[in-house]
Amino acid sequence: MTAEESAGEWRDAVLCIDIGGTKFAAGLMTTDGQLIDRNRAEINPESSAELLFDLLTELIDGQRQRAAHHRVRILSVGVGSAGPVGRDCVTISPINIGAWQGFALRERLLELTGLPVFGELDAKALAMAEGWQGAAQGMRNFCAMTVSTGIGGGLVIDGRLIDGATGNAGHVGHLIVEPGGRRCGCGARGCLEAEASGLAIEAITGRSPTEPTYEIMRRTGTLVGRGAAMLCTTLDLQLVVVGGSVALGFAATFFNAAQEELDRIMATAASSVTGSAPLLVSTRLGDAGPLIGAGAVGLRGLRRARVATP
């Protein structure tokens, strides 16, 4: 216990929410970025919209009750959600949660908590977290990728997180890495998501991505490295930070294959002549990254609201 806590002083915090393709998570993060509590629950993607929100409500209520134990005041709610999402998660449409296509998440969270709610695409939130506390600290040009149930990304260019026209910039899962390959949900063939996501691996192998062969770990890493090379050559990036349950679960076998493919392509790319070759590394924050990212979204929202207030 800190001296501040023992003296009876309370700290400020953000309620962090991570909406994934197969699980929900909630946590409490102090304003200096310390994740002090969290819980999670696996979801049934076949559940109704209301049953899913009831499950999320249980997690949120649990964290709000824990806030008193930790002596923290919750100032806002920060959300990172699988996409596509509307700005500030006014609506969300996680690709693997059929009942939540166009779900009005922000309004429901406002009603539930009575707190300001700020939201972002999950991979963009992860980019914020890794740039703040993780593997991309001090980097002005990088991409954060999530290789999990699906594949997403967040892009930081010249120190700024890129939003795009709808706030969904960074859908790196739809880079074509295997021309003429498997049909993707977007309609194209050979997208990274259709070849290297958790859902794709299960469809290709008939096995859960938690039980991979050496060959599938290498193949997945190679394809992600190929997609990373496209991003690095197009956007002149210095670093690609990769997280997500598939990438982290496949560990060194995945990351070695990804870096080898990135190096192979960059060796012949004109941009590699002008500087050192980019690196592809694991997230430093591990499975805490998505919640810290959601917390960062909540803090950013508060700062912007204060600036906008006369």
Image (spheres, helix red, strand yellow):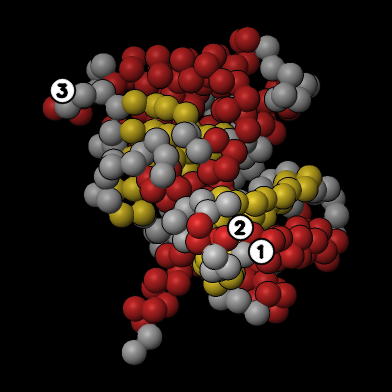
**Residue tagged 2:** 28
Residue 61 visible in the snapshot: yes
Label 1 neighbour load within 10 Å: few <14, some 14-19, many 20+: many
Going by the numbered disc 1, the residue's amino acid type is Ala
Q: Look at the picture and state if 294 lies above or below 264.
A: below
Q: Is residue 279 left or right of residue 114?
A: left
Residue 189 visible in the snapshot: no
Q: CA distance from mark 3 to mark 2?
A: 45 Å
Image quadrant containing the C terminus: bottom left
Q: Residue at x 62, y 25 (%)?
A: 249
Query: For numbered disc 3, what is the local secondary structure?
Result: helix
Query: For numbered disc 1, what is the local secondary structure?
Result: helix
Q: In x, y percent, where is residue 253? A: 54, 14
Q: CA distance from mark 1 to mark 3?
A: 52 Å
Q: Is residue 305 left or right of residue 92?
A: left
Are the two marked residues, 1 and 2, in contact with CB atoms closer than 8 angstroms? yes
Q: Earlier in the sequence, mark 1 or mark 3?
A: 1
Are the two marked residues, 3 and 2, in contact with CB atoms closer than 8 angstroms? no
Q: Look at the picture and state if 221 lies above or below 4.
A: above
Q: Residue at x 85, y 61 (%)?
A: 51
Residue 273's mark? 3
**Residue tagged 1:** 67
Going by the numbered disc 3, the residue's amino acid type is Val
Q: In x, y percent, where is residue 110? A: 65, 76
